[in-house]
Image (cartoon, grey):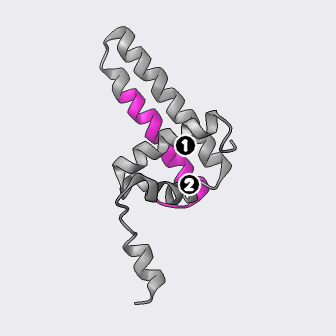
């Protein structure tokens, strides 16, 4: 088995978010994928606000579906890769919000 096959079947496990974030960004090179992440995260925040305002727990489910749904479409349809949330869910969740902030502040292009 060559090293390329090993890397693809056994992706590295990152010990810190600082190590993980450059990898996370490399998985989001396509601008449409990034835009879909931004849209899904924005909708998730709207759903969170509606959950707080209404107390209706269905908004929590709607927020999760919106956030991950848009992101996964971006990965499968545009990046043609497997979402990092399948491999490192906690770091990926943090990465979504750091990338959201970086896009909002102009550090990363839409």
Precedes in sequence: disc 1 or disc 2? 2
Residue hosting label 2: 25
Q: Is residue 83 visible?
A: no
Crowd around label 1: few <14 · some 14–19 · many ≥20 (10 Å): many
Q: Residue furthest top?
A: 54
15 or 51, which lies in front? 15
Q: Position of residue 74 (x, y in %)?
A: 56, 48
Residue 63 lies in the magenta-colored region: yes
Q: Are marks 1 and 2 in contact (CB under 8 Å)?
A: yes
Q: Residue furthest bottom?
A: 1
Distance between the Cα atoms at labels 1 and 2?
8 Å
Q: Residue at x 39, y 34 (%)?
A: 64
Quadrant of the frame with the C terminus: top right
Q: Residue at x 48, y 43 (%)?
A: 96
Q: Residue at x 45, y 85 (%)?
A: 3
Q: Position of residue 31 (x, y in %)?
A: 67, 48
Q: Position of residue 70 (x, y in %)?
A: 52, 40
Q: Majority secondary structure of the magenta segment?
A: helix
Secondary structure beneath dot 1 equals helix
Secondary structure beneath dot 2 equals helix
Q: Position of residue 68 (x, y in %)?
A: 44, 41
Q: Is residue 53 visible?
A: yes
Residue hosting label 1: 99
Quadrant of the frame with the N terminus: bottom left
Q: Residue at x 36, y 9 (%)?
A: 54
The total number of labels drawn is: 2
Give the image quarter of residue 27: bottom right
The residue range painted magenta reads 61-82
Against 73, residue 53 (above or below) is above
Crowd around label 2: few <14 · some 14–19 · many ≥20 (10 Å): some
């Amino acid at each position: 088995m060559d090293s390329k096959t090993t890397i693809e079947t056994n992706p590295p496990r990152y010990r810190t978010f600082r190590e993980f974030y450059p990898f996370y960004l490399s998985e989001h090179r396509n601008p449409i994928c990034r835009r879909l992440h931004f849209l899904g995260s924005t909708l998730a925040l709207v759903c969170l606000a509606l959950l707080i305002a209404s107390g209706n727990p269905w908004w929590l489910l709607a927020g999760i579906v919106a956030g991950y749904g848009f992101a996964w479409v971006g990965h499968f349809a545009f990046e043609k890769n497997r979402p990092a949330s399948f491999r490192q869910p906690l770091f990926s969740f943090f990465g979504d919000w750091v990338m959201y902030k970086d896009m909002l502040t102009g550090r990363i292009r839409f």
